[in-house]
Image: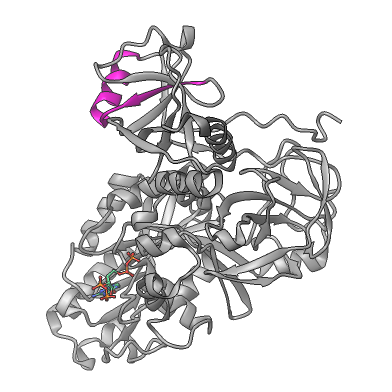
Amino acid sequence: MTDIDPSVYREVQRRRTFAIISHPDAGKTTLTEKLLLFGGCIEVAGAVRGRKSQKAATSDWLELEKQRGISVSSTVLTFEYDDVCVNLLDTPGHHDFSEDTYRTLMAADCAVMVLDLAKGIEAQTEKLFRVCALRQIPVITFVNKVDRPGIEPLELLGEIESKLGIEPIPQNWPIGFGPDFRGLVEIRSRRAFLFDDRDGDRRITGRETSLAGLTGEGVPPELATQAAEEVELLESVSQLDMQAFAAGKASPVFFGSALTNWGVEHFLRGFLALCPPPGNRNSDLGPIPAARSAFAGFVFKIQANLDPRHRDRVAFLRVCAGRFEREMEVLHPRTGKRLRLPRAHRVFGQDRETMDEAYPGDIIGLVNPGEFRLGDTLCVGAPFEYEPLPQFSPEMFAVLRCPDTSRRKQFERGLTQLLEEGAIQVFADPQRARREPILGAVGVLQLDVVKFRMESEYGAQTSVNWLPYKLARWVGDVPNGGKELRLAYGARLVQDQWGQPVVLFQSTWDANYAAGENPTARFSAIRIPPAPATSTGKKN
Ligand code: G4P
């Protein structure tokens, strides 16, 4: 079972699978577009942005998307650069931020953290960073918008360290920033790249010189001196400890400007040199080697097609081991069934194409007539299950009601189905006689999708009654299901779908108060659910 297959090994070594974490407007879309340009995936700058802004006009298949002008369906962008196959997993942001954004990070081997030089570490970046830290995946930082006025770069490094607890290791350094920006110095080689055009050309353009030769190239002496002093200072700390990087404790930092394309290819090359290829993943049978010949992967996202003409679901599977081939028969350990996978797709934005072969690091879309659940493992050979996907604290809570009692059954069936798919989280309050389920979502889109699907798929009109809670904390190490916890007025003890005690809080202050008042209890914003009851190797 653990044989290494040389042809799979070769493919593993040339794959890089990563996600971008950022706060809205930091420049994720612009950077993605520039990376795709280098990868030859799109011909002109503006194509991705064009899709983003024209979506409401061009997409006629996704009603909700039309109404909201957002994308709920993009998943992975694949491109080749220098014979490396790069899979960029899309992490929905803005209004379509949802639990899927977090789960996508479970499928990535590395994250690129895009920061806006003017804004530093913002809320959404920090949240996503915490998820990366949970998995201890390497994080590479791209500080964007150096052409705009911002925080002193040295100050930003301090903020990365103090807010995120990760050591920033600059790989290049800006010569001035904002209107003074003149170019970038590669710290290790002390080579300087001076940029003199602003036409957003595809390649790093401009002159190359040495750090000592900056003034001779027309850089004002005060900028040249400052850059030389800072590089001097940073040289002693710019050695990246690869072990600390691999464990998510140190982050190489690249400066640049995605919009003007300054430093992007430099970053891409640095990124490809640093981002690890797919590694071995843990399972209930221990680590499973990526380069073995037998295929295995897990479902990290289920996407319902909201188009009534094509009401299918696509389960997105991250290949973690072996070679996937179309039509292959795989084992579905949770149900013990054997399945043939004839309809596997590569998904590029909204376009699908049939996929004949895939390797670790790749994402395949499986048209799913309902048999897959989030976190499910599919494998060939001896059955096993990869580690379960964690659950993340929702940030909005509501009671969903179905006023039409004649649709009650459909409503409940729909809710169960959506819960299984991971479209929403459900909590129950055992104290209340009327056991209305409390729905928890990370972003408002999640609830919109549930409401929309309840009506269109299950014929159940629903009304949403918002609750005042803003976060949930799973509670561990408490007797009596948490009934004796000392909580601030307004906090509510409920149970998750597995009967685990969870407290819903109206503010972070309330949550901190509860932690202080109950020092022996463990409050946690992320929970690893129990492994599902399966028919895996352990039981056979
Ligand atoms: P996001 O996906 O992270 O939300 O950010 P996005 O790329 O959409 O960028 C947000 C805004 O920041 C855009 O401006 C974009 O042009 C700008 N931007 C991105 N990178 C840079 C950079 O390196 N330098 C400068 N100066 N600006 C940058 P916008 O006005 O909101 O949109 P648009 O009119 O340019 O499309």
Left or right relative to 347: residue 128: left
Residue 201 point in image, percent of width and height = 37, 90
Depth check: give the residue in front, 199 or 70: 70
Kindly indicate the quadrant of the structure image that contains residue 412: top right
Report the side of 285 relative to 171 (left or right). Answer: right
Residue 331 pos. (x, y %): 81, 47
Tell me which residue sits at (40%, 64%) in the image.
66
Q: Is residue 266 visible?
A: no
- Answer above or below: position of 271 versus 83: above
Does residue 434 appear in the picture of this structure? Answer: yes
Q: 510 left or right of 400?
A: left
Total marks in image: 0
Residue 483 vs residue 9, the one in the foreground: 483
Q: Which quarter of the figure is the C terminus placed in?
A: top right
Measured along the vertical axis of the image, is residue 239 above or below residue 485? below
Among the 4 quarters of the image, the one containing residue 471: top left
| For residue 436, side relative to residue 13 (left or right) | left
Specify the quarter for ligand 1. Answer: bottom left
Q: Say above or below: 246 vs 210.
A: above
Residue found at x 20% / y 75%: 176
Q: State the image coordinates of residue 499 (x, y, percent, origin top left).
A: 54, 20
Whether residue 505 appears in magenta in the rendering, the answer is: yes
Foreground residue among 58 and 483: 58
The structure residue drawn at horizontal position 23% and vertical position 74%, both measured from the top left corner, is 227
Which one is nearer the viewer's eye here, 479 or 83? 479
Residue 365 position in % (x across, y down): 65, 60
Q: What stretch is highlighted in magenta?
A: 500-518
